Image (cartoon, grey):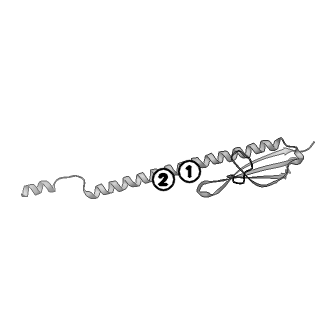
Amino acid sequence: MRRLLGVLAGESGYGMVSVLIAIVLLSVGVVVLSSSSVFLSSLKNEASVRSVAATVALTYMEELKTRERVTLASEDPLRVNEKGEPDENGAFLRVLEVSSEPSVVESVRLRIKVGYPGHFGRAMTVEVVTIIYVGE
């Protein structure tokens, strides 16, 4: 009997505590990986929305460049959809600011700001600026 107890006491292997620690570490690793994938997915979505907002701003800027120079004036904020068309339920808020440009004679500065819903519900903005000569 003594010999049997000696053999059993000398056995090496994993104890219950080691197995529990391994399970906890594995669970923490899985949680970290899943949360990072959710975070990366939300960043990808935000980048996509930012790209659409930039496209809305650039498209509107190109439209402004074709207008008569004397009709260029600041506009109130306007809700637009992803195509840049006015839509009261649009996800984007477009603002046009026209101001004189002191560094260039007879010119105006056009600043288009397009607001979009950002990460964690924060409002973000894309801004496009150009200078247009309005002289004759």
User: Mark 2 is on which residue type?
Assistant: Ser
The residue singled out by tag 2 in the image is: 35
**In the image as oriented, which residue stretches furthest toward the left?**
1
Residue 119 % position (x, y): 60, 54
Visible residue check, residue 94: yes
**In the image as oriented, which residue stretches furthest toward the front?**
88
* Residue drawn at x 62%, y 45% as measured from the top left: 48
Q: Nearest the camera: 16 or 87?
A: 87
Answer with left or right where residue 20 lies relative to residue 112: left
Quadrant for residue 122, please give it.
bottom right
Answer with left or right where residue 43 lies relative to residue 109: left
Please count the marks in the image.
2
Answer with left or right where residue 1 lies relative to residue 132: left
* Residue drawn at x 91%, y 44% as measured from the top left: 135
Q: Is mark 2 on a helix, strand or loop?
A: helix
* Quarter of the picture holding the C terminus: top right
Q: Residues within 10 Å of mark 1 (few under 14, many from 20)?
A: some
User: Mark 1 is on which residue type?
Assistant: Ser
* Residue drawn at x 76%, y 45% as measured from the top left: 60
Q: How crowded is mark 2: few (under 14 residues within 10 Å), some or many (20 or more)?
A: few
Residue 42: image tag? 1
* Quarter of the picture holding the N terminus: bottom left
Q: Badges 2 and 1: C-beta atoms under 8 Å apart?
A: no
Residue 17 % position (x, y): 28, 58
Residue 86 % position (x, y): 75, 50
Residue 49 % position (x, y): 64, 48
Which badge, 2 or 1, is on the more N-terminal residue? Answer: 2
